[in-house]
Structures are given as C-alpha cells and as structure tokens.
C-alpha cells in the first residue's frame, strides 16, 4: 500500500498544510490565514480541519498516512511535542501540540521549529540539495533559521539553536517580544519593515509608499514597500538597503562563526523581494565578513512558500 505523510506550517500570518507521497511530491495543498486571535484551542481546531481537508482532497485514507510533521514559530521541545513559547502568537505557553493533534487526528505527530522545517525542505528538495554546510533563513512574520553542519541539522544543547531573529543588531534598540532589545527580527521581519516604512512615509508624503495607502499609514506593509520599490521609489529603495544592512550584518557574523558554504533566504518576505534584497545583502556580507568567510554564496529559496510544509512532511517521512 502506498504511504503518505502530512506537513503543516503554522505561521503568524498563514497556516499551510500538504499531503505528500513517499517520494515527497505534493498531492494536495491548502492555506488559510491563521486564526491567531482565537488562541491555541482555535488554532489547533483550524489545523485539525486543514489536515483532514488535504487528506480528503488527495483521496487518501487515514491508515495510509504514516505521520504528521508540524513546524511551529517559536521554541519547541520536539522530544515532548510541546510548544514552549511562540512569541508571535498570543497565549501560547507550554502547549502540548503533539499530544493534542495525536488525539484529534489519530496520527503520530512530530513537532519542530518552523524555520528548521523550512530548512529541512530546502535541504532535501530545494536550494540546499548539494550542500553540507548551510544556513537557511526564513523571513516572514518572524525571522528564524535552520543550520546544517557537515550535513546534519544543528539543534543545540536544548534544541533552541538557530534563533537568528534574536541576534542583537542594535544596542538598546526596539523592545522585542523575546524580552531583549534590538533583535534582528524587529528590523527585518514583515512587521519590522512595516514599522520602519510607516516612519519613513510619515516623514515624506511624496513617497509612493504614502501615496499607495492614501495616507493611511497603518495600512503600510512590506508588500507596499515591494510595490513602490518596483516603481523605483527612492524611499522604498532606501528601506530595502537598510534591511540589507541589518541582515548583511547578521549574516557576516554568522559566516565568521560557522563558515558555511551557503545561505538560503526564504519566507514570505525574501520570496517577495527576491534579488532586490539579495544583491545588497551580498555586498554587505562581502564588506563585513572576514577573509574566506566572504565567499559564502547567498541564494533564494527554491520551494517558495511551500518550504515549511514540504520540510515538515519530509520530516514525517524520514521518521
Ligand atoms: P508566516 O510564516 O509568519 O505566516 P510568511 O512566510 O507567510 O509568514 O510571510 C508573511 C510575511 O511576508 C508578511 O509579513 C508579509 O507582509 C510579507 N510578504 C508577503 N509577500 C511579500 C512581498 N511580495 N513583498 C514583501 N513582503 C511580503
Ligand atoms: Mg512561517
Ligand atoms: Zn528577540
């Protein structure tokens, strides 16, 4: 009997699910806006419905599904299947996601940090296929990463390695949801960019960012910046350069520590901005990293917004 696996990617903005076959090919896919305001119970119910939907859509029975992998945006105890803290989702503290989903779905469930699941996807099927030493960054509502050293995923002593979004890039900078000040995430996540874009637009009402929202500054998002940059708006281009400065600084530090061969940039933001962001990031890393560490390649993720779900499903297949 053919085997299948389900992958789920929970984000602060979107929740996605796929069903894949034994070869990791996607048979069905679904995406919804995360009902984050409904708290853990509501979101668990939403995930359960989404999983049932992708299984049904693919015409597969529950007994053919080998397991479920789920990526969660925060610090996860993957041995116990517990979401310890999800900084970008309200009310999530020590939620036994694995146990809850196993009861509801009657499937073995494996929980892991979302950015690590995306990195796993890119390593198995995407831009990281032919590399052993790489870091895959995900820029979305938050900023995370998965680190591979000598071909193996690096989880760290307690499983919380790779929190690149919480590298301090501004001493005494903006207060982050993690409690620290000046974290990278406060400047280069979707929300961080929107925050800087609102400040820039309120200083300059001639900017296309300001014009695009008819002066309703609160409606500005990273997508607004993207559209304005495509029309060569100087304020938008400056914002992208500033983003590249912060990100490049963090990547140069990482390159000096790990000497990876490859950085992969994925997540809603880098998938959207693409080379507009990658080009200036490469320059900053070249300027800041030391000696051989300048040579790290920096490329776009290949699985787009499905990296996380595919990684989660591949993880479930590999267990
Ligand atoms: P999450 O996994 O946290 O739900 P995603 O990886 O789906 O997040 O990315 C959502 C974020 O990406 C939002 O902050 C959104 O503003 C941003 N985004 C999506 N498309 C684009 C684009 N074309 N340009 C810039 N930012 C984008
Ligand atoms: Mg995500
Ligand atoms: Zn932080």
Image (cartoon, helix red, strand yellow):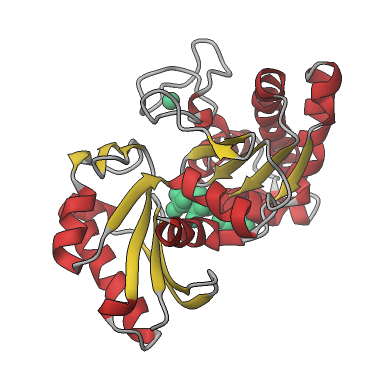
Measuring 72% from the left and 25% from the top, which residue is drawn there? 259
Farthest-out residue, top:
171
Q: In this view, does 79 lie to the left or right of 145?
A: left
Farthest-out residue, bottom:
59
* Closer to the camera in the image, 60 or 226: 60
Q: Where is residue 318 in the image (x, y as percent from the top left)?
A: 45, 57
* Closer to the camera in the image, 237 or 175: 175
**Vertical side of 60 occupied by 111: above or below:** above
Whether residue 221 can be seen here: no
In the picture, residue 285 is in which quadrant?
top right
Q: Which quadrant is the N terminus positioned in?
A: bottom left
Q: Where is residue 99 in the image (x, y as percent from the top left)?
A: 17, 52
Q: Is residue 224 left or right of residue 46?
A: right
Instruction: Tally the numbered discs.
Output: 0
Measuring 84% from the left and 22% from the top, which residue is drawn there? 292
* Closer to the camera in the image, 162 or 245: 162
Q: Position of residue 75 (x, y in %)?
A: 35, 34
Measuring 50% from the left and 62% from the top, which residue is drawn there? 310
**Vertical side of 129 occupied by 142: above or below:** above
Measuring 50% from the left and 31% from the top, which residue is drawn there? 162
Farthest-out residue, front:
1
* Closer to the camera in the image, 248 or 302: 302
Q: Which quadrant is the C terminus positioned in?
A: bottom left
Q: Where is residue 83 in the image (x, y as percent from the top left)?
A: 27, 41
In the picture, residue 159 is in which quadrant?
top left
Q: In this view, does 13 lie to the left or right of 196?
A: left
Whether residue 307 can be seen here: yes
């Amino acid at each position: 009997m053919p085997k299948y696996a389900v992958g789920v990617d929970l984000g602060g903005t979107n929740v996605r699910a796929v069903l894949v076959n034994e070869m990791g090919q996607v048979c069905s896919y679904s995406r919804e806006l995360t009902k984050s305001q409904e708290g853990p119970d509501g979101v668990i119910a939403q995930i359960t419905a989404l999983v049932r939907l992708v299984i049904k859509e693919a015409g597969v029975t529950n007994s053919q599904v080998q397991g479920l992998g789920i990526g969660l945006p925060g610090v996860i105890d993957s041995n116990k299947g517990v979401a310890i803290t999800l900084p970008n989702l309200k009310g999530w503290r020590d939620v036994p996601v694995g146990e809850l989903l196993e009861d509801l779905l009657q499937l073995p469930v494996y929980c892991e940090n979302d950015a690590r699941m995306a990195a796993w996807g890119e390593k198995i099927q995407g831009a990281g296929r032919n590399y052993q030493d790489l870091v895959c960054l995900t820029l979305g509502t938050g900023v995370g990463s998965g680190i591979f050293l000598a071909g193996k995923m690096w989880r760290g002593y307690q499983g919380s390695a790779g929190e690149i979004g919480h590298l301090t890039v501004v001493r005494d900078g903006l207060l982050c949801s993690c409690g620290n000040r000046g974290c990278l995430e406060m400047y280069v996540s979707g929300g961080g960019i929107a925050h800087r874009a609102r400040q820039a637009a309120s200083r300059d009402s001639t900017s296309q960012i300001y014009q695009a929202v008819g002066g309703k500054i609160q409606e500005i998002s990273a997508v607004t910046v993207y559209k304005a940059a495509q029309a060569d708006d100087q304020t938008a281009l400056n914002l992208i350069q500033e983003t590249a400065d912060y990100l490049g600084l963090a990547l140069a530090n990482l390159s000096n520590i790990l000497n990876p061969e490859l950085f992969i940039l994925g997540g809603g933001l880098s998938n959207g901005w693409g080379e507009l962001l990658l080009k200036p990031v490469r320059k900053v890393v070249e300027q800041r990293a030391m000696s051989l560490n300048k040579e790290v390649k920096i490329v776009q993720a290949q699985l787009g917004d499905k990296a996380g779900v595919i990684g989660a499903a591949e993880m479930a297949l590999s267990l």
